[in-house]
Image: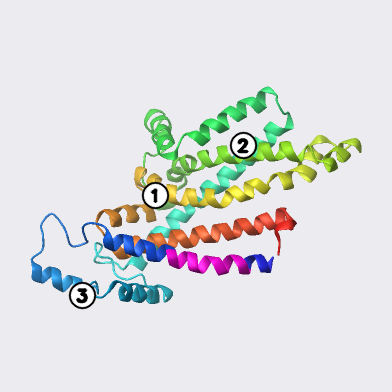
Amino acid sequence: MLGLVARRLLTAIPTLLGVILLSFLLMRFAPGGPFDGERPLDPATREALIKAYGMDKPLMEQFMLYIGNVLQGDFGPSLIYRDFTVTELVAKGLPVSLTLGGLAMVLALVLGIGAGLIAAAKPDGLVDRVLGIVSTLLTSIPSFVTAPLLVLLFALTLGWLPVSGWNDGAVPNMILPVIALALPVAGGIAKLTRAGLAGALAEDHVRTARARGLKPLTILFRHALRPALVPVASYAAPAAAGLLTGAVVIETIFTLPGLGRYFVQGALNRDYPLVLAVVTLYAALIILFNLIADLIYGWLDPRVRG
């Protein structure tokens, strides 16, 4: 297992550096800039601002300075939110995004694995077919479509839940965003769990367990579930990454103070340090999710350990 972690870390560091470099160059070569507003600045003021933020230096020198500051936990000053540093903005928005994505992932796992187990308990029955159709629908409908529908039904029509806002993380305000994020992922997990169980229940050791007279639920949970979750573990990392990046849209729809809001505003206003900080954090979290998924995969299937 330690060998697996070491191999993943050796590839993670250059991958993260590559993502930062590519994002850095794309931001610099994109049309426009942070000081190109509707009312253009006079040349002297513009030149002074560019020099004050170190944007007059060669690109590679700017990049190396940025990497050095990031290693010290300093993402630089925000070019738009002048009263805050990027680190302060990240510290405000990251807990909201992580809470939203984490709760959505837990809900998706509970719903997806639960639906897969129910469907596999009586294969090819009515419940199995209905859950298969529902899982396909959930997977096909993106969260930015599901979110307005949930708001229309539960907030505007029934009045059970608030339309938007964070309210310091109050439970009613989190319910709709978490459900909107979780449903597409839950559908994919349900289909993978059902397919994995179908294969696991056909294995020889499961047939032997049946021949010994073990109860169906005992066979399902003790002998079939663990190998059936191997494809779910492989899917978990990109699913978690999708929840994190998908939260950008959900946070905008529900007016939540997460990183997504800052990322959108930073991209629209060419706030280079803010956009780079969000991209760097997202990339680091995605790499971390992949590492966790590999560890879970290794626990479920010891053949991949090294």
Provide residue 304's location: percent of width, then percent of height.
Answer: 70, 58
Query: How many angstroms separate mark 2 from mark 1 (CA)?
Result: 26 Å
Sequence-first tag of 3 and 2: 3
* Residue 288 to residue 135: above or below: below
Bounds of the magenta segment: 6-18
**Cβ atoms under marks 3 and 2 closer than 8 Å:** no
Query: How many angstroms separate mark 1 from mark 3 (CA)?
Result: 31 Å
Residue drawn where x is 36% and y is 70% of the image: 75
Q: How crowded is mark 1: few (under 14 residues within 10 Å), some or many (20 or more)?
A: some
Residue 68 - label: none
Given the image, on which type of amino acid does mark 1 rest? Answer: Val
Q: In this view, does 60 lie to the left or right of 136?
A: left
State the quadrant of the N terminus: bottom right
Provide residue 233's location: percent of width, then percent of height.
Answer: 63, 50
Examine the image and state in which quarter residue 50 appears: bottom left
Q: In this view, does 229 lie to the left or right of 173?
A: right
Query: How many angstroms separate mark 3 from mark 2 (CA)?
Result: 54 Å
Q: Can residue 270 be seen in this view?
A: yes
In reply to whether residue 267 is colored magenta, the answer given is no
Callout 2 secondary element: helix
Residue drawn where x is 34% and y is 55% of the image: 263
State the quadrant of the C terminus: bottom right
Q: In this view, does 10 lie to the left or right of 98?
A: right
Sequence-first tag of 1 and 3: 3
* Residue 65 to residue 251: above or below: below
Q: Can residue 258 be seen in this view?
A: no
Residue tagged 2? 191
**Cβ atoms under marks 2 and 1 closer than 8 Å:** no
Please state which of residues 34 and 74 is positioned toward the viewer in this rendering: 34
Examine the image and state in which quarter residue 265 appears: bottom left
Residue tagged 1? 248
Residue tagged 3? 52
